Image (spheres, rainbow, N blue to C red):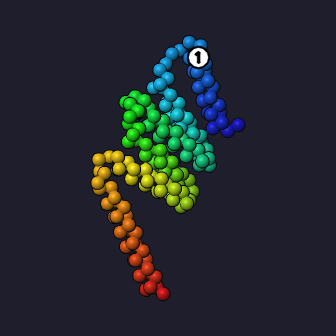
Amino acid sequence: MKSSNAIFGAGLIIIGLVFLLENFGFIEFAFESVWPFFLIIGGVAFWAGYFTDRKNIGLIMPGTILTIYGGLFLYCSLYGWYHMETAWPLFMIGPGIGFFLMYLLGTREAGLLIPAGILTGIGILFAFRHAGYVRYWPALLIILGIIIVIRHRMEKKEKQYEG
């Protein structure tokens, strides 16, 4: 049996015992503020599974998403859910970071950078929209567009000189 399966099984046993003991009144905890820790623990378990067997690159994505979302939910449960009004772009940034980490820690498959860039970029743009720089965030799009146009023209000129 793989050690990642054993870690997952042990995690389920622990979670089941906690809920069972809480249901029968042996322990009490404020579930409203504690439940995000279960997401974080799940994320760490996926990461542990990856570090146990680095061939399981697919464990990075759920590990990253659960850890980031768990941190977001923990923050909101402790400091107020109204923060979700501006923190929601993390729902896009989380998978974007997951794809980027899969690229960095895996076989450097370039195809992973496409969803990483799109999801992270869109999430950051929406985060800027809610940050106080409302008037200036479109300037980033203009600068990015200028860079792409200049690079395209430079590549076109290089091909003309080669040909």
Position of the N terminus, as image quadrant, is: top right
**x, y (%) of residue 149?**
39, 72
Q: 126 or 146: nearer the eye?
A: 126
Q: Residue at x 48, y 87 (%)?
A: 163
User: Would you name the residue on which mark 1 appears?
Assistant: 23
Residue 63 position (above or below residue 11): below
Residue 122 shows in the view:
yes
**x, y (%) of residue 109?**
56, 59
**x, y (%) of residue 4?**
63, 38
Amino acid bearing label 1? Asn
Q: 45 or 123: nearer the eye?
A: 123
Q: Residue at x 57, y 21 (%)?
A: 18
Q: Residue at x 37, y 30 (%)?
A: 79
Q: From the viewer's perspective, tell me whether residue 110 is left or right of residue 137.
A: right
Residue 101 shows in the view:
no
Q: Residue at x 38, y 30 (%)?
A: 80
Circle 1: element type: helix
**x, y (%) of residue 65?**
51, 42
Residue 39 position (above or below residue 32): below
